[in-house]
Amino acid sequence: MEVERESDWNAKVIEFSDLAEDIGKHAASIYRAVVLAKNDDDAATIAELVATTPMHSVSVVTRNVKSTTIVPGAIKAKIYFQKVEIKHSLKGGGEADGEQFHQPRLVKQTKGECKSPTIRDTELLRVVIPQETVEHMGDWSTVTKEPRKFVFKMLKEELPTEIAKAIVDTWGYAQERDEGQPTITGLVKVHKSAVKLMLSYSGIANLIFEPLRWQDPLPRVQVKWIDKNKDETGAAYRKRRIDMRPAYGLARGRKQLGLRATYDPTENVMHTWYVDHVPRTWDDTALLECIEQQTELVEVSIKKPKPRGSNHSAYWLLAKSPPTIDTTPMYFQDDEGSWATCWLRHARPTQAKEREKRPIKDDSRMRPPETGKFGMVTKHVIKRDDDRRRQRRRHRLSQLLRQRQRRKLQRNKKIEETGMNQSTWILTTRSP
């Protein structure tokens, strides 16, 4: 039997079945109680019964799953909670006439006034653990088994305390092989106020942090890529970049580490350029001379030429230019004395190889968290194999149904075009 606990209310608690008898015992005094009703019919009967008393202050508690009021109760001495609707009935006076007329209610158990908690905005960052940056710390397999534990260890030991406190959650770790280099990637949810500070420490604690989107409040940055020296270890390469003190930490490319710096529209940035329709009669010197005279590119070096037909060539160049420029023209006279134009543009990045990705077992069953009303993080378990099988079965059945519908539509269309139905066809074929 479900009952409300009398210790949780500032008045006695009775069942609906005991109400009539209890009212008779207090006929000469103010009747004050909390009465439990199972449904609206019971609540209506309770209202009629208490109306017979000369003075009363009664709260009627009715179960209502749509209500937002939750009260404690007990089932066989075990605590439970349920949603209820509370209605107060008052007769013979008001709260100003004494405490006996006060509405029966739950005993106040909070320390102070109830206020909505402060919700802090959060941001998602990608965390990358390259093998070459932790190879000096021991066995790589220990990091792959418990990457989440390794991340929190680095945050606690290597980074300021405010960064570790700003971490809300981390999940979704997987082992990848990018350009032949094993890495571990995951997601970190942090307070938005600590994002800039966290990025400034990117690469320092063997962890590289990357925003999923560069948007407010993140500033616009530019990356200066630095090549790795011959025979330089990964740890030494990383340390050399960190010693340059980048404003927003290290960025990770396919084969390089870069320095994130504040965007400066006046500072030249190194890019790979591509130029086509260069006369075949030109050599490297002629091309460099034309670029120097007509463009803003500086420190130009030719990477490799590429023949393009019998009259033209194409070149890949490495040069610095203002970050606002991504194309620039060059004018020249061809062999016939006519003026022609060839354009230089930023080279398109080569097609990246598909990364080999293997979810790490400990975290592969966790989906990205969802933020609820009060910022609480709820993790969801990925569907099990039997759920996946049911999904595939439903998918196959829906495909078969669509195929049957298409065949039926095609058959009906063919019948309409021939101008006869199926029964006519059967009769004509069977006639002697």
Image (cartoon, helix red, strand yellow):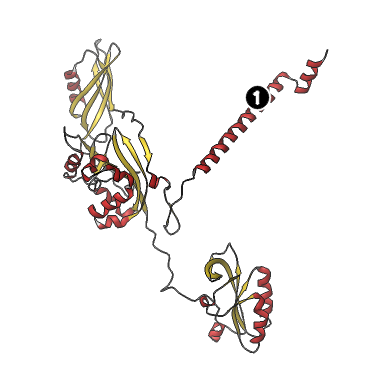
Residue 325 location in percent, x, y?
Answer: 26, 32
The answer to which image quadrant residue 423 occupies is: top right
166 horizontally vs 291: left or right: right
Secondary structure under the numbered disc 1 in the rendered image: helix
The answer to whether residue 201 is seen in the rendering is yes
The answer to which image quadrant residue 38 occupies is: bottom right
Tell me if residue 30 comes above or below residue 176 in the rendering. below
In the rendered image, the residue lying farthest to the bottom is 28
Image quadrant where one finds the N terminus? bottom right
Give the camera-side residue of 233 and 342.
233
Image quadrant where one finds the C terminus? top right
Q: Amino acid at mark 1?
A: Gln
Q: Residue at x 76, y 19 (%)?
A: 425
Give the camera-side residue of 233 and 100.
233
The answer to whether residue 260 is seen in the rendering is no
Give the camera-side residue of 133 and 213.
133
The answer to which image quadrant residue 112 occupies is: bottom left
Q: Say which residue label 1 marks.
A: 410
Q: Residue at x 67, y 71 (%)?
A: 42
Tell me if residue 52 comes above or below residue 405 in the rendering. below
Residue 370 location in percent, x, y?
Answer: 44, 52
Residue 97 location in percent, x, y?
Answer: 55, 86
Neighbour class for label 1 at 10 Å: few (<14), some, many (≥20)? few
Residue 346 location in percent, x, y?
Answer: 28, 29
